[in-house]
Image (tube, rainbow, N blue to C red):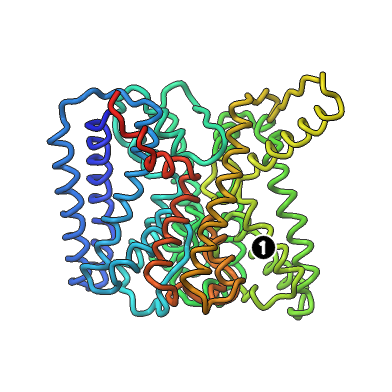
Amino acid sequence: MNRRMVIYTLGILLDIEAVLMLLPAAVSFMFGELRTGAMLVVASGAAAMVGTLGLFLCRKHDRTIYAKEGFVIVSLAWLAMTLFGALPFVFAGELGFVDAIFEIASGFTTTGASIITDLDKISRGLMFWRSFTHWIGGMGVLVLMMAILPSDTDGSVHILKAEMPGPTFGKLVPKLRKTAMILYLIYIGISATEAILLMCGGLNLYEALIYTFGTAGTGGFGLKGDSLTTYTPYVQWVIAIFMMLFGVNFNLYYLALMGKVKSAVKSRELWLYLSIIAVSICIVGFHIRTLYTNFGDTVRTSTFQVASIVTTTGYSTADFDSWNGVAKGMLFLLYFVGGCAGSTAGGIKISRLILLGKTIRRDLRHMVHPHSVGVVKFEGKRVSDQTLNGVTSFFLLYCAILAGVFLLLSVFEPSVNVETNLTATMATLNNVGPGFGKVGPYLSYAFYSPFSKLALTLSMLFGRLEIYPLILILSPNTWKRR
């Protein structure tokens, strides 16, 4: 284990977080929230101090990164960013330590689950920081680091493999830093477009940025307790469309920008993603049609809610917990699907579901024809057995963690019904946010005990980092010196 390289990289990330905190501090000062702005500056200083100390102590080191270091850096980076990112809430006295950890972890992991029961009591600067963490975490904090800093390390690809969502990782261009820059430029471009369109719909710059951060990171933090219910149909349609756009693999946007539109639209994952959305909208719309007076409201509501759940954003324009069994059941299934690989969405990912299905079909065929040689292809390329085994292992670990967290909640929260505990676990592990029952779209997670909140926080991190990095740091073999 190249421990000095791990500490050095964590130092860089904490310094970056310290700089990022200055933006919400500036927002606080602009709105006259002097104490909140000062606390953000203090928290920024604490992160900068620890980060700079790490850089100083480990400035001379071997800069090679292997797979083991990559997983460790990603895991510890997200834990450290969450810890220091929670400090402004604690210093300002607006949230307790455990609640602040839960809230900011929900922000960075783009989950959108909240323990805040009255959003009006939170200062504007901290509301901005809370939503800004969605945008930072959406594309990934280490991707951001590689995009803005010259890469002077060998094996940085292991970091991106550990952080980027999906069963496989591929560079857009030969140089890794340029790949990170391209991804972030696309991310910034789509985000800016959404913010402008929201301002055209009557939102001020502050509101537009808050909801752009929540949409781009597919997170779901907002400014109102009823989410987007009271906003105009125009605003709801803009956010619905951009939620679906951010659930698409960003590699396809790059192909389209390079003039390879035909290659982009041939993606089987893209077409399955769009098909799932279309079918789900029809099913949900049909079963909620009696709740609305006209066809347009039905289409808009079903489209918005399906887009919100399948992309794991978590915004709502209706209390979907009160819908009938079929409509709720459809949304329940969408919790597990998620967006495309290489998007900002959470969930299992459509590409994994495709590969899992192909693996099952190959195994069934092999049972009937024992001497057949099954080759699994995805997007026209052969998929290695290592990747297929990884998908199967991921699914088994996913089920184990889902069951484990649910059982913990059942034991430590015996007064909470099964529906609430199960969907709370699903909503955090899949980075969706709202669930059913007591954690419905207009409610919060505030009633859970500190232990349960920490368990759900860990569930969010497992979901965002796709399990393996956090499991590997618990293994003694990971920490052995080479």
User: Residue 410 placed where, x, y %?
Assistant: 53, 69
User: Residue 208 placed where, x, y %?
Assistant: 45, 63
User: Residue 290 placed where, x, y %?
Assistant: 79, 79
Which of the pair 444/394 is nearer the observer? Answer: 394
Q: Which residue is mark 1?
A: 332
Question: Badge 1 local density, few (<14 within 10 Å), some, or many (20+)?
Answer: some
The residue type indicated by label 1 comes to: Phe
- Left/right placement of residue 38 relative to residue 292 reads left
Q: Residue at x 62, y 58 (%)?
A: 335
Which of the pair 5/297 is nearer the observer? Answer: 5
Q: Residue at x 16, y 54 (%)?
A: 45
Tag 1's secondary structure?
Answer: helix
Q: Quadrant of residue 128?
A: bottom left
- Above/below status of 391 relative to 83: above
Q: Quadrant of the N terminus?
A: top left
- Above/below status of 18 relative to 94: above
Q: Quadrant of the C terminus?
A: top left
Q: Quadrant of residue 364?
A: top right
- Left/right placement of residue 202 relative to residue 132 reads right
User: Residue 36 placed where, x, y %?
Assistant: 22, 69
- Is residue 268 in view? yes
Q: Residue at x 78, y 61 (%)?
A: 282
- Is residue 184 in view? no
Which of the pair 77/249 is nearer the observer? Answer: 77
